[in-house]
Image: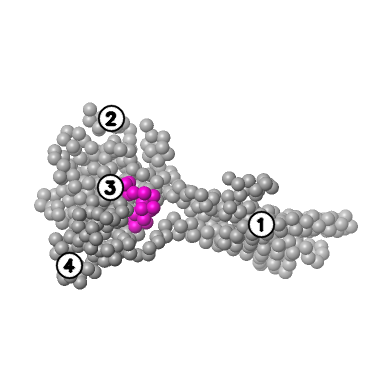
Amino acid sequence: MPDRIVPHFQEELEQLKTRLLEMGGLAEDRVSSALKGLVQRDAALIDRVLAGDGPINDLHIEIDRRCFKLLALHQPMAVDLRAIVAAVKINTDLERVGDLAINIAEAVRRYMRHPPVKELIDIPRMADIAQRMLRNALDAFVRRDTDLAQGVLNEDDTLDALKTQVFRELLTYMLQSPHTIEPALDLILISRHLERIGDHATNVAEDVIFMVSAKDVRHHAGEVEI
Amino acid sequence: MSVVQTIPPSLTVPVRPQPDADQHPVCIDVQGLNFYYGAKRALDNITIGIPAKLVTAFIGPSGCGKSTFLRTLNRMNDIIPATRVEGKVLIDGDDVYRSGTDVVALRRRVGMVFQKSNPFPKSIFENVAYGLRINGMAANRADLNARVEESLRAAAIWDEVKDRLYDSALALSGGQQQRLCIARALAVKPEIVLMDEPASALDPIATQRIEELIYQLKAQYTIVIVTHNMQQAARVSDRTAFFWLGRLIEEGPTDRIFTNPAEKLTEDYVTGRFG
């Protein structure tokens, strides 16, 4: 018999984190596939993204149930309470990222009905940043690393700036040749979805900081400590 | 006035539980049990199936009959004068109240741990060895030693006492004494362990150790625990039964009882809106 008993609550908390990571991996993978479909004009890949929402939706429900049960049966306190509340919120953010991957895939499918408006440079860059933010936010969650989480928050401005740049650039294309309006609007929508994915990664990073240090950094709240 | 007369007639009859029958067949099958202290009915028509190798918790306000019911399962109420039982308690199909039941054998099969730890005023070793000796369960000294160690390990106390097995059990802390009592109950290889408020006299750390122990023991034993601590029932049990005024109001999976009970009385109790 070990000297130190690991409470089964802690085991269940670890399982919860593992499931959240799985969900994060799925969401990231779907964003990655949607972008690959755009760059490579791969209709089959886009179709797979559009059809494959089931596992994320199932995990969304499962994780919420786990959180609900842990809250009801274990009355967690302090860091454990913050971890479960954070998990509920992160779960919602990850599910939204999965939905945004679908939105991107829908826009890509429409975009592919037209010839390419231009060579894609900034949108793949945005996708890299958004996915890195998401990955780092989840790593920060697992490692309880507030520095990494803070890094995610700092990257959000870059993503916002790129979205503005994409919009301005495509605006010039649309003004010059109206037949590019439809596909260019889809590219603008895609950049908007990627920017939203960055916002969700930012939410996750904020939740990590709250979970680890009990500081609320949302809305530039001046790092209010509860 | 009898307790029974105060119960509103509208209460629904509890539904028989249906746990995973393959993995956890019904081990204790109670059918229409009434229990009387003299003329006063303390348990009213209790029907419940307690599944094997799970933890079932009995909760309810003081005087609701949960401890009385627990003690009917191994006939511990027999020692109280002027009590009477009606109905059946079947353990693996045998009615424990049929005439001719060997009560000593029953209590070996259905062990019990009490609210206040009650080690014998003997050494730690002797506390566990005692039941093995009187039941002739050890072939020789080496076998006895091995069985004592096995029981102390199962009760998660071996590492704390292995270097002082021959010290008095009364020198142990309250939490250690309670785990020793659990080791003593486990030594005679029971099938079922009944626990009556096993952690109510312990501090939070000792309580957590007991709770984790209960959680681990269910792999091998059917455990029934009475607790007035709802949170404890939530943490340790797989199934929860809510008693009120001598009646079983509701029984079901613990997560359902604590998140979405079927009965308003249960909801009022678990949310603290009682009375």
Quarter of the figure with the N terminus of chain B: top left
Q: Residue at x 41, y 35 (%)?
A: B273
Check chain identity for marks 3 and 2: say if they share one. yes
Q: Position of residue A197 (x, y in %)?
A: 67, 56
- Mark 1 crowdedness (10 Å alpha carbons): few <14, some 14-19, many ≥20: some
The residue at which mark 3 appears reads as B115
Left or right: where does residue A23 sit relative to residue A192? Answer: left
Horizontally, is B48 left or right of A221 in the view? left
Q: Position of residue B95 (x, y in %)?
A: 17, 51
In the image, the segment drawn in magenta is: B199-214
Circle on res. B6: 2
Between disc 3 and disc 4, whose residue precedes? 3
User: On what subunit does the disc labeled 2 rest?
Assistant: B
Give the label on residue B138, or none. 4
Displayed quadrant of residue B227: top left
- Secondary structure beneath dot 3 equals loop
- Give the residue pinned by disc 1: A150
Q: Position of residue B92 (x, y in %)?
A: 22, 56
Q: Nearer the viewer, residue A141 or B26?
A: A141
Q: CA distance from mark 4 to mark 2?
A: 52 Å
Q: Establish whether labels 3 and 1 are both on one chain.
A: no
A222 and A164: which one is in front?
A222
Rendered location of residue B124, percent (x, y): 24, 60
Instruction: Kindly tell me whether residue B169 is visible in this rendering.
Output: yes
